[in-house]
Structure formats: C-alpha cells, structure tokens
Image (cartoon, rainbow, N blue to C red):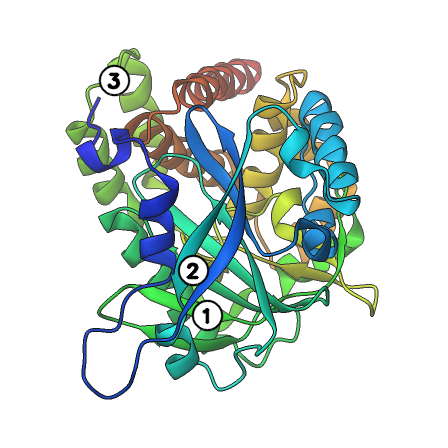
Amino acid sequence: MQTSRSVLRLLTTAHVLEVAFPAVRDTTGIPIIEERRVHVISQNAEPRWIIIGNPGDAVSMLSSWRPWNAGSRLRWRAVLAAAAVRLLPSLPGVENSMVRVDTSYWRRSLADFPENWNAVVHIGNPSRTRKAIVFFFSGNGPVSLVAKVPLVQGGSWAILNEASILGHMKAFEYLPRVLFQDLQRGAAVQTWLDGKPVSRGFTEAHVDILSTLANRGRTSRVSEHQKDLAAELDKVDFPFDRSVLMKSLELLSYDKPLQGFVEPRDFAPWNLKWLPDGKLGLLDWEWSVADSLPWQDACRFFYLDDALFNGSGRVWEMLTGNRLLLDYRRQFEIPEAALPALTLHYLLRVLCADWQGGNAHLAQHSFWQIQFLLETQKSAVAKL
C-alpha cells in the first residue's frame, strides 16, 4: 500500500497553528501577534480540535458538530456541557495553554475578519488530502468565516479544487460561497452554511439536490472512463481477486450517452444541512468533478451508509428498488441496462481510492459489493 510520509507523521498543536495562522514574510506591515488561551482535544495522540479563546464562546459552533457513532456522541455532549460552564480543562485528555497567534495573514486577506475574534480549528483524519478547517466567529456569535488550510501536499489540490467548483456554481444558493483563495499556499475561505444536521434517511430533498447537479445539454458515457479506471487498477497492489476486477472492468463498455452531472463525490449525511428554507445545503466539494456520470452520488450515499453502519449488504437491491431513485432515473432517462455499469464504475473507483488512502474496511466492502453485483448479473443472464 502506498502511503506518504506526510500522512504518517504525527501532528502537533504548534504545527497546526503555524499552518492555520501563517506568518506573513514581507515588510508591508507590522505582524499582529496576540497571546490567546487554547484548549486542545486530542485523538490518537494528535490534536483533533483546538479551541482558541473562551470555550464557552465556542459552544454554538461546537454544537453544530454531530458525531455519528453513539459513543462519540455521548463524549461530545460531555465536551459541550463542560465548555458551557468553563470546565473543559477538567475533562481527561484536554490540554490548555497560552499561545502566540499571528493573525496578520487573515486580517490582510479578509475584509470582514472579526475584530473580536475567536476560532475553533478542526483537524481532519490522516489522508492524502488532510487539512485543517478554521471556523472564525466574533465573541460567542455564529461562525462568519470558514478557512481551509492544507496539512499535507495533497490537501492543497483538494482545497483549490473545491474553490474552483464552488466558483463555477456560485449561482446556487445551497452551497457555500468562496471569499478568498491563495493559490500559493493552497488555502481558501468560504462562507458558513447555516443549517441543522441531517439524519441518515434518503428523501425527496436529496433527489432534488442531486437533480440540480445535471449538466444541461452535456452527456457522458461509461465507456469513456474504462481506460482510466483500468490504469488506476494496474497501479494498485490489491489483495483482491484480479479476475473479479477485470470482469467488472469489462462491463464498463456500456457506450450509450447519458446525462452528464457535476459529482460532489462525498454525498453523505454529514455533508448535508437542512437550510432555513427547508431545502438541503451541500458541503465538502474537495473531491468533486465538474463532468461526470449520473447515479454516482446515489451510490455514494447508499453504499457508504451500508459500510459504516453495518447494513444488510443488499445495497444493489435498495438502489434499484428505491421509488425516489426510480423517479430520478425517469427524469434523466437513465435506462435500467445502464445501472450495472454505472454502479460498477462507482465501486471500482472508490475501491482504488479507499485502498490507496489506507481505508481497508471500505475497500473490502466495495470488493464484496462488486462480487455481489457480478453474481446478480450472472443470475439474471442465466434466467433469460
């Protein structure tokens, strides 16, 4: 398995703060350095959350975070309760200290940088695109600015890719707006999308937002992606049966034109919010693709849920039998014959991405689903 050293190196609070608040190396102004108290919540010997300022002022922002694991949810409630009554340092594993923070870079880059600022820094999981997200807010008010900074080299590409896609889609109101990007540092700032957490269910609102992602007047063919996926499979040293993967690849020869789509590539409940107008808002566009196939985000939603929450494993049946997705298929004239190729395209792509990213559990789940789908197709052909 290919893993970069930058992914394996343990992060420190000092390093994260240096990246999140970069020094400005020029002579155009005097650095603005402030001494602030920070509280650090760690996970696996690395900082996971860094609260800059009074933890009680950060409760509103922290409350927007909703862990999906039941145990994590209980622990997070304890964090919120302790922060609200200024007892966060009493919790096991929470460190607090005074640090010097240079806000010069952000003050020069952002006209609306809050004067009475506080911040919460969230550090992403180790990956090829690891980043830190800095949530800025004034006093104990709502978040006003969301800055993303890379912690590894691949993080820059992901952050700037998201900024580019959001820039092209700025007419849509259910997305964050890009306020600033730094091509050299690979950093970007966007607006905060205010809303309520979303449950795991799949509703009409989900189909509505997927439907808006259609590239009107543009088509895409599964067969156009076959060669690139074959090359990607060749690069990876899998423990999986290669004959199964090659059989799957053969089914990507489906050549009929289909409606083209923008693909966010992480269409999942934790990246969705219920907006005040009752519609869904969509976050996290770092892996998004401007010209892609239909059906991919539906696959993402259902397969990921099954893998992470110990589902029945019968995702193919759920996808093809879902009434809302049947309406989606009719709306965009996606024939039933295209579904195996579209689904295998998704599964093969995430199999590569998850294995290379070190997520063996998700990769194994994708392989099992590929096997199941091939057996299903074999049985269907035998009945003809």
Question: Circle 2 sits on which residue?
Answer: 148
Q: Nearer the viewer, residue 346 or 237?
A: 237
Quadrant of res 347? top left
Callout 1 secondary element: strand
Question: Circle 3 sits on which residue?
Answer: 238
Callout 2 secondary element: strand
Q: CA distance from mark 2 to mark 3?
A: 32 Å
Report the mark closest to the observer, 2 or 3.
2
| Residues at discs 2 and 1 in contact (Cβ within 8 Å) | yes
Q: Nearer the viewer, residue 176 or 255?
A: 176
> In this picture, is 90 found above or below 155?
above
Across and down, in percent, residue 73 comes to 72, 30
Horizontal arrangement in the rendering, residue 328 relative to residue 363 (left or right): right
Callout 3 secondary element: loop
Quadrant of res 75? top right
Quadrant where the C terminus lies?
top right
Q: Residue 189: which disc?
A: 1
Q: Residue 7: which disc?
A: none
Q: Residue at x 39, y 80 (%)?
A: 109
Quadrant where the N terminus lies?
top left
Across and down, in percent, residue 104 comes to 36, 75
Q: CA distance from mark 2 to mark 1?
A: 6 Å
Q: Residue at x 62, y 57 (%)?
A: 210
Q: CA distance from mark 3 to mark 1?
A: 37 Å
Q: Which kind of residue does numbered mark 2 sit on? A: Lys
Q: Residue at x 33, y 16 (%)?
A: 244
Horizontal arrangement in the rendering, residue 245 relative to residue 38 (left or right): left
Horizontal arrangement in the rendering, residue 131 relative to residue 250 (left or right): right
At label 3, counting other C-alpha atoms closer than 10 Å, the crowd grade (few under 14, some 14-19, many 20 or more) is some
- Tell me how many marks there are: 3
Say whether disc 2 or disc 1 marks the residue closer to the N-terminus: 2
Across and down, in percent, residue 179 comes to 47, 78
